[in-house]
Amino acid sequence: MNYSTNLPAILGGQPAVTLDQVEANRWPVLTEDDEKAVLQIMRDGDISTHPVIRELENDYRNFSGMPYVLAHCNGTTALTAAFWAIGLKPGDEVLVPSATFWASVLPLVWLGAVPVFCESESERLGLDPADMEKKITSRTKAIVVVHLWGLPSKMTEITALARKYKLKMIEDASHAQGALWRGKPCGTLGDISVFSLQGGKLAPAGEGGMFLCREYEYWERAVCLGDITRIMELETPARRFAATSFGIKTRIAPLSAAIARNQLARLEDNNKQRNHNLVYLSAGLEEMGIHTFLSPEHIQRVYFEYLVRPDFGAIGMPMGTFIEALKAEGCIAALPRYPLLHQQPFFAGGAFLDIMRPTDGARVPDYSAVSLPVTERVNGAMMKLPSFPWASQELLDQYLRAFQKVITHADQIVRRPG
Ligand SMILES: Cc1ncc(COP(=O)(O)O)c(C=O)c1O
């Protein structure tokens, strides 16, 4: 396709993107059906324990095929419950990515467990199995897999490692609602799998989280941790904890559960639309040498967020200038929004020790010395573009034109007078 080579806006030309982008990027979309569902709960008057919570869990059971599901007040709490449920103890080590949202990792520190940061690979942005294997010790007990931005991780290799070393796998599928890996839904690939239903997610509730597993014992431990309705209903000896739980409260609010049910029902259609737009945009960007993380054949990715990797060497322009030039064209473009965890003051500055009082024999990493060169390079080369859930093809073509203008004038843009 010829996107024309008009003068870039940063050099005084006309911006390529003129169409409205607010509606094209509106998310989440709350419909009249969502309003009705929330109103119904309010009219029913039971705003703490309404049966809609169990209906939501049933929906997720049907959606995933996982037999045990427990709704939580957010994804962070569902992850906390997952770490608790697999029985992590002080000093246990858990292999984790650094390139993720903090909630994939930090709750495990509250159990005294030790996050061991591993490299993320550059193809699918998940944990790098080769680096993971190097970091396994006799203390390693679990793995946290995150399908970053909706791109399923390298599960064949990671699952093989988990089997070989008898490690539990927590799957944080918060970005990957609706994604498939070898035909299997993300959210069914771990010993325990978790979705966040936070407002920006693909099937949002406002605040909410889902905990899914195949083993009754994990579910029961999650119930005991903080679902005060369910503990009282247990028919096992664990019911003896009904008067106290294990100290936190994890139940989802019914108003959120009502929204979550509707959003899950619309997930497939919404994902289809978003994928249609971003696969189209990606095809055009790939022609210009920009890597867009299109799904390999055995995977059906989704797009929680849309990150791409331009080849700045080939383009001949540094990231900052590229983003500046695209913004001048009217594009929305930014750096990725997750800073790498191992570099944050909580780890590199030692603040985690305030929570994690190391037990005898625990290996406490000096996080300030952790080096993840591949992750650091890959993360630093990514650029975030809008997810375009509702963009018209015309708007996507305007983006492609903007990229083409900027790339074909890279020399002049870099040498422009400051
Ligand atoms: C990968 C990932 N895991 C966990 C969470 C935490 O979920 P919540 O915000 O629902 O607590 C989020 C984001 O919100 C996330 O992006």
Image (spheres, rainbow, N blue to C red):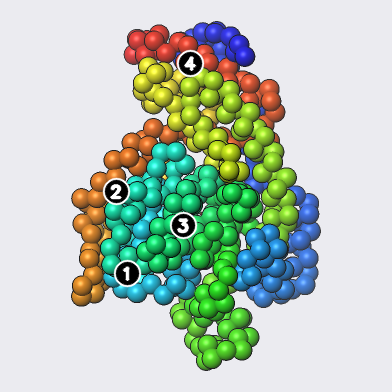
Precedes in sequence: disc 4 or disc 1: 1
**Residue holding disc 2:** 343
Q: Quadrant of the N terminus?
A: top right
Precedes in sequence: disc 3 or disc 4: 3
Tell me residue 308's x, y (percent).
48, 32
Kindly tell me whether mark 3's CB lies below 8 Å from ligand 1: no
**Residue holding disc 1:** 92
Q: Is the residue under label 4 in contact with that under label 3 (CB below 8 Å)?
A: no
Disc 2 is placed on an element classified as: helix
Compared to 13, does 296 lie above or below?
below
Q: Nearer the viewer, mark 1 or mark 3?
A: 3
Precedes in sequence: disc 2 or disc 1: 1
Q: Nearer the viewer, mark 3 or mark 4?
A: 3
Query: Tag 2: residue type?
Result: Gln
Compared to 408, does 280 lie above or below?
below
Disc 1 is placed on an element classified as: loop
